[in-house]
Image: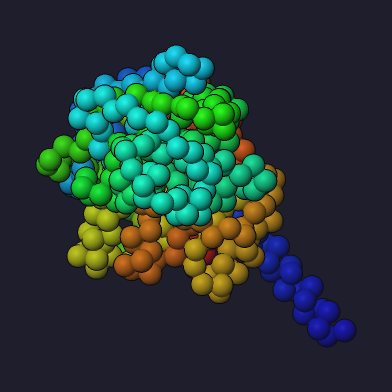
Amino acid sequence: MKTRVLSILLSGLAYTCTAQDSVMFRKIADEVMLHGTCYDNLRVLCKTVGHRISGSPAAAKAVTWGEKAMKEAGADKVWLQPADVPYWYRGKESLYLKLDGKYEKVAALSLGNSRGTGGKTVEAPIIMVHNLEEFKALPESEVKGKIVYFNYLFRQDFIFTFEGYGDAVKYRGLAGSLGASKGAAAVIIRSMSTGTDDFPHTGGTRPYRDTLKTVPSMALGNKTADRLEKACLKGGVTAKMTSECDMKPNMVRSYNVIGEIRGSETPEKIVTIGGHLDSWDVGEGAQDDGAGCVQSIEVIRTYKALGIRPKCTIRAVLFMNEENGQKGGQAYADSAISKHEQHVIAVETDAGGFSPRGIGLVMPQAQKDKILAYRNLFLPYGVYDFTKEEGGSDIDPIGLKLHTPLAGLIPDSQRYFDIHHTDNDVFENVNHRELKLGAAVMAQFLYLVSEHGL
Ligand SMILES: [Zn+2]
């Protein structure tokens, strides 16, 4: 009986605490859904800057945009943090496949960081493999001088599509160097795509900058990939590949854009929220990751608009060079170390501006438990999944070097890999309510961590 009274008392206390938080959650959501500027900000980024690969003039323009947007959001302090980044450029490219006896031009994209054909045309027969095991089993003599087609299908049975991506992405990362290991002339891959369309997806390859051990690499959209698969089963398929892509010889000075609200009680403790400002050189980098950038800025704007004075310092960071080098994330961690900063948590939103479903947690169980105690607060906003260990590439370095707990927004994942890294990643494919709801959830989450600690 005593135990029961105590537990009622305790639950009463817990209720008082969460009731206040619940009121603040509602205020934050109302502010973002009714007055949020993140969608308008995204329009400006997408339509006036467009895609913005690291090192490019467009990336420099994006930095200027970010600095202005951060100031307009009302940050107490805005600054640029230097990061030297690689500059991979695409140039002209084309792929012709002889599928039905005559050559036809198909939609294809060179893979990021890859070395092209130097503008020359490589013409060779295609040899198809479905997976690494099949490739490994092939004798070198069968691969030499040919174009290897890695026809690995993005698995559709994973419900959380990031698992499918994790499973398939090695074919993008390794295809060029695998091809080189057996003397292939070039490689073609089926895109890392859940889509039923024909958009090819670019993306990073390894080994990074190691031009000696890789061969020209291109990706196909799923429709062309299906046709090529059928044709290869019959045999006699050849391809003509031409590309100019390469890495520029020198690194380029670029920047992370940082905006901050100084903490009211413990300003030395820092809570970071970020997305990445660079994108691949196709589409408009809307979902990947313009969405994360404008959501991070929205957190600052919302706190200012509501007069919230967080206990900890809140920082919004637009990281540079997530896609092909992670130099921005490294610069952020290195700066934190050199300045002996105290980081409570670093949070990233880089999984698209879709309806939020959860928050990934990369931290010891005791800290997870502290967050899980508040999970019911998120239910009215459709956020229920705290099981995934997902943070983000830009915050990985601070997690590794400073053991900072990490978290990541987990939006609904069904459409992300239809459009990620394609010409279809444009502003029109972002829904304003979903984008704002994600921003609201990030502002709510940061509020909790800043007020109650970890
Ligand atoms: Zn991204």
From the top left corner, tell me how far across and down residue 239 is, in percent.
Answer: 39, 26
When the figure is inspected, residue 423 is found, relative to residue 150, above or below; the finding is above
Q: In the image as oriented, which residue stretches furthest toward the bottom? A: 2
When the figure is inspected, residue 34 is found, relative to residue 445, above or below; the finding is above
When the figure is inspected, residue 425 is found, relative to residue 86, above or below; the finding is above
Q: In the image as oriented, which residue stretches furthest toward the left? A: 250
Colour scheme in use: rainbow
From the top left corner, tell me how far across and down residue 433 is, in percent.
Answer: 59, 30
Q: Is residue 95 left or right of residue 86?
A: right
Q: Nearer the viewer, residue 178 or 88?
A: 178
Q: Examine the rendering and report whether any part of residue 318 can be seen.
A: no
Q: Nearer the viewer, residue 186 or 232?
A: 232
Residue 112 found in image quarter: top left
Q: Is residue 140 left or right of residue 200?
A: left
Q: Nearer the viewer, residue 159 or 40?
A: 159
The image quadrant where one finds the N terminus is bottom right
Who's the residue at 57% across and 51% down the image?
A: 163
Who's the residue at 54% across and 56% down the image?
A: 360
From the top left corner, tell me how far across and down residue 356 is, in percent.
Answer: 59, 43
Who's the residue at 50% across and 43% down the image?
A: 129
Q: In the image as oriented, which residue stretches furthest toward the right? A: 1
How many dots with numbers?
0
Residue 51 found in image quarter: top left
Who's the residue at 21% across and 25% down the image?
A: 119
From the top left corner, tell me how far across and down residue 169 is, in percent.
Answer: 47, 47
Q: Examine the rendering and report whether any part of residue 419 can be seen.
A: yes
Q: Is residue 410 left or right of residue 257?
A: right
Q: Nearer the viewer, residue 65 or 422?
A: 422
